[in-house]
Image (tube, helix red, strand yellow):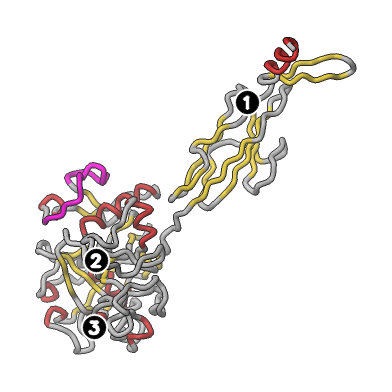
Amino acid sequence: MRGMLIVLTLMVTTLLVVSSGCITCLKIVAKPEFNPSGGNYYFPQDVTITCETLGATIHYTLDGSNPNSASTEYSGPISISQTTTIKAKAFREGWANSATASATYAVLFTPVQMVTVPGGTYIMGDTRGEGWISELPTHSVTLNPFQIGKYEVTQAEWQAVMGWWDPDPGAWGQTYGVGDNYPVYYVSWYEILKYCNARSLAEGLTPVYSISGSTDPADWGPVPTFNNSNWNAVLCDWNANGYRLPTEAEWEYAARGATNDPDHLYSGNDVIGTVAWYQDNGENSTHPVGAKAANGIGVYDMSGNVYEWCWDWYAWNYYSSSPANNPAGSAYGNTRLLRGGSYYGNASLCRVSTRNSFEPNGPFRYGGFRLCRAID
């Protein structure tokens, strides 16, 4: 019995091989290890594989098959952007092969679907004669090319980055559409600044917004629930490739399908019910993004569903002094721009030229957003 215990102990680090009546002890290569370990992740992961045995080579597969010495040799981090099972085995000449290591990475995050909007010139404002004085005078605007989200940011996307979302912050027992593919709402302009930079950093992009000299939202402190001068003084790096809010001019250009011809009243159509969830069909609720028809450049829900925050301060008479090239709004104000109308608003509020606004610290049940990016 004592001899058996000794043999079993040896098997932990060596393999006893009997050949032609001789016993040969082979050391066993250590089992490979993964970093990070397998599990559920919201963002793509760079996985490293290590082996404690010096001089060992690691071979791996990504298709679920068991690796051997002919499989791909590991030479550096493996980028995982979708649900994948990695299997790895380590080899060293004169040693017994390692056990097979296996880890599954479930990547829950869906990359932002962006539409490239070509640069160009358009007429901004109430071109149909159905709007308010704040939409006048109509004026020519020239924009650089940019990218804009195909869909409004969803509840799943918000939670993946922020780790929370409260569909009923007032504890009133009333929500307005809940589900992964529904647009997020009850988010303030300040909170969106944090979201944009946090998501940019998570995806390896250069963050756009800077508050008190830092682009890392971890340095900004709690998101203000009252109007805050430091957060109001946020700086925007227009050349950074990270995520940001569109300017009001970019938003309207994208909503028009990057053209005034045809000069649609709503985003993509003159018949509002084909492109928008609004007061008459919204049933007092948001709806999953992309359920209505897209506009001419393939962007959804720019009329109706939820209001969309823009970068600009609101000034009712801004159009009288707006610059012609890449306008970014008034230099100051009390409220930030909202565009597009909502499931609760009437048809007039869903027009592509309608302007509205709200306090930047104030989340409200009609308000969501979509992302924008500079062209790399």
Local packing at callout 3 (Cα closer than 10 Å; few below 14, some 14-19, many 20+) is some
Where is 186 relative to 69, above or below? below
Given the image, on which type of amino acid does mark 3 rest?
Asn
Which residue is tagged 3?
346
Q: Position of residue 294 (x, y in %)?
A: 40, 77
Q: Secondary structure at mark 1?
A: loop
Q: Residue at x 54, y 51 (%)?
A: 83
Q: Residue at x 71, y 18 (%)?
A: 8
Q: CA distance from mark 3 to mark 2?
A: 18 Å
Residue 272 numbered tag: none
Report the front residue among 3 and 32: 3
Where is 350 relative to 151, above or below? below
Which residue is tagged 2?
309
Local packing at callout 1 (Cα closer than 10 Å; few below 14, some 14-19, many 20+) is many
Given the image, on which type of amino acid does mark 2 rest?
Trp
Q: CA distance from mark 2 to mark 1?
A: 54 Å
Residue mark closest to the camera, 3 vs 2: 3
* Left or right, residue 7 beside residue 160: right
Question: What span is in magenta?
Answer: 212-226
Given the image, on which type of amino acid does mark 1 rest?
Ala
* Left or right, residue 330 beside residue 245: left
Residue mark closest to the camera, 2 vs 1: 1
Q: Quadrant of the N terminus?
A: top right
Local packing at callout 2 (Cα closer than 10 Å; few below 14, some 14-19, many 20+) is many
Which residue is tagged 1?
30
Q: Main secondary structure of the magenta part?
A: loop
Residue 56 lies in the magenta-colored region = no
Q: Single out the residue that lies furthest toward the top.
A: 2
Residue 216 lies in the magenta-colored region = yes
Q: Secondary structure at mark 3?
A: loop
